[in-house]
Amino acid sequence: MRKSIVLIFFIVASIILCGNAQEQSNIKNNQTKTWWKEAIVYQLYPRSFKDSDGDGVGDLKGIISKLDYLKSLGIDAVWLNPIFSSPNDDNGYDISDYRNIMKEFGSMKDFEELLAGLHKRKIKLVLDMVLNHSSDEHEWFKQAKSSRTNPYRNYYHWWPEEKGKPTPRYSFFDVNNDAWKYEAETKSYYLHYFSQKQPDLNWENEKLRNEVYDMMKFWLDKGIDGLRMDAFQYVSKDTTWKKYPDGYEKDIIKYYGMGPNLHNYLKEMNKSVISKYNVMTVAEGAGSTLEDAHSLVDEDRHELNMAYHFEIMDIGNDPKGYKLSDLKKAFTKWDYSFANKGWLAIFLGNHDVPRMVSKYGDDSQQFRAYSSKLLTTLIMTMRGTPFYFNGDELGMSNIKFNNIDDYRDIATVNGYKTAKAKREDLKAFLDKQKFISRDNTRTPLQWDASANAGFSTGKPWIKVNPNYKTVNVATEEKNPFSELSYFKKIVALRKSQPVFVYGDYKVYDIENQDVYCFTRVDGNDKVLVILNFTKKDLSYTIDKNINTVNAKLLINNYEGMNAIDNNTVKLKAWQSLAFKIHQP
Ligand code: BGC
């Protein structure tokens, strides 16, 4: 009897002690440990991933046929761009039925098979929730526009003709950048921040909100693991429709983002939906300030859990280049602010921006592979959850179309019409698109050197990048030094070293325009990352406070390196290195 009392005492004491130890490691940066902080997310653009039926459009069966490829990458979760029914004015970001699968992509049965196949391989699934707007072909909108008294009328924002012209609102994709479209049937204008076929949903309407929550539960009950909240920062509108100052569109997030009721809606959504599931929720766009982002994702806010902010993405937008110190400052500012509270998504590419290697690296034949591996290193060694865009693991680069007819993206196609109407320099417009257009990143995934890169047996919906003959999965799988092999290696490294997930980040030498150097520290675990962002070989002197004696090389994007000598290391063009080091 006495023995068992002693045993119970011992067990209770050790639980308390272990709990304290856990707490202590968390006190350092207050970060609780969760699966979605430790996950590596692979963003998969279904339209361009793999076509199974020869219609030139990627589909769910195509993805199913590549499940083992996804597994081989070592990633933990897949974020799928929208797969719901859609007339595809904006490649699925215009949804006509939230509870069905887009015909070109397959059926609900295919979806269920895909989800089961991912789960079987221990890969989670994140779906894209487009809730700021629907398609104008959604039944709600068809009803709403049929009469002013239709029960669905208030699912959208209307401005009756008798009130005169609506207060101007900017539209991202409209040829005239006018966010109000006139509907003769009910003599009213409706609001569309994006294209005319993407009317904004009226979140002020509780009925609409409840329908949306039910729809979210429908997918969560199927067993999905996360939600990426598309453009959600725009859902709450200032319905007094006040006039904004001239030029407001240059600072659009300040005016459109973080509307008066946004937090109320998110809290309501969290209470009635999200809190009931163990899912990750990502805020695409995170307001204009660090405070805005915190207000969306800090744990004690009970809203979303990860901020996907745009500040870093906005840095490389100038085709003339960017200052490395600006990139470092942006990463550093966000990391330091989120060290103790809140959590960030880390990314350099997605379906809305050019290929990361063309934007932040060097896509010339000589340096494409090295610079792409360096950027992968940055993403995989930074604090936050990596969101890695499909094809970047191969070092895919911008296609740089010469002709407007090759473009498919509404942003470029309508932007061209706008430029033409304003008699702007169309050549200059096209030159810029080679760098900036979203289609650069949406070209088919390059599977092998066969016709259409093995993506489809039909005519692909968008041209394949001609570099597919050498930049492709089959070729890279055979080469232990390829971008793909490097990607797998660094994914495995991140998974094996928790310091890359939770360790504190510290930047050194922030004004240096050539080299990005930082450490990650978690207790006694310390790593040093050194990235040469130039095409020159150079010599870099590491801060003297970093002890590099006995530094152990963890990863290198070249086959060899010179030893660190007296805290100085010789770096090759676009070389990236990570070391395990000792505390001073
Ligand atoms: C998506 C874009 C889309 C837009 C409108 C964005 O945030 O990422 O691809 O065009 O929302 O839905």
Image (cartoon, helix red, strand yellow):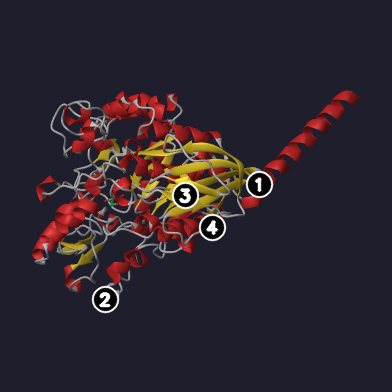
Q: Say whether disc 2 or disc 1 marks the residue closer to the N-terminus.
A: 2
| Disc 2: CA contacts within 10 A as few (<14), some (14-19) or many (>=20) | few
Q: CA distance from mark 4 to mark 3?
A: 15 Å
Q: Earlier along the polypeptide chain: callout 4 or callout 3?
A: 3
Depth check, mark 4 against mark 3: the one in front is: 4
Q: Nearer the viewer, residue 383 or 103?
A: 383
Give percent across and percent down for residue 524.
66, 43
Nearest to N terminus: mark 3 or mark 1: 3
Q: Amino acid at mark 4?
A: Tyr
Residue 235 visible in this rendered orientation of the protein = no
On the image, numbered disc 3 is attached to which residue? 306
| Mark toward the start of the polypeptide (4 vs 1) | 4
Q: Quadrant of residue 83?
A: top left
Tag 4 near tag 1, CB within 8 Å: no
User: Which residue is identified by label 1?
Assistant: 583
**Crowd around label 4: few <14 · some 14–19 · many ≥20 (10 Å):** some
- Mark 2, secondary structure of its residue: loop
Can you give x and y, in whole percent of width and height, for residue 558 in the image? 41, 37
Give the percent coordinates (x, y) of residue 160. 20, 67
Badge 3 density bin: few <14, some 14–19, many ≥20, Cα 10 Å: many
Queried on whether the Cβ of the residue with tag 4 lies below 8 angstroms from ligand 1, the answer reads no
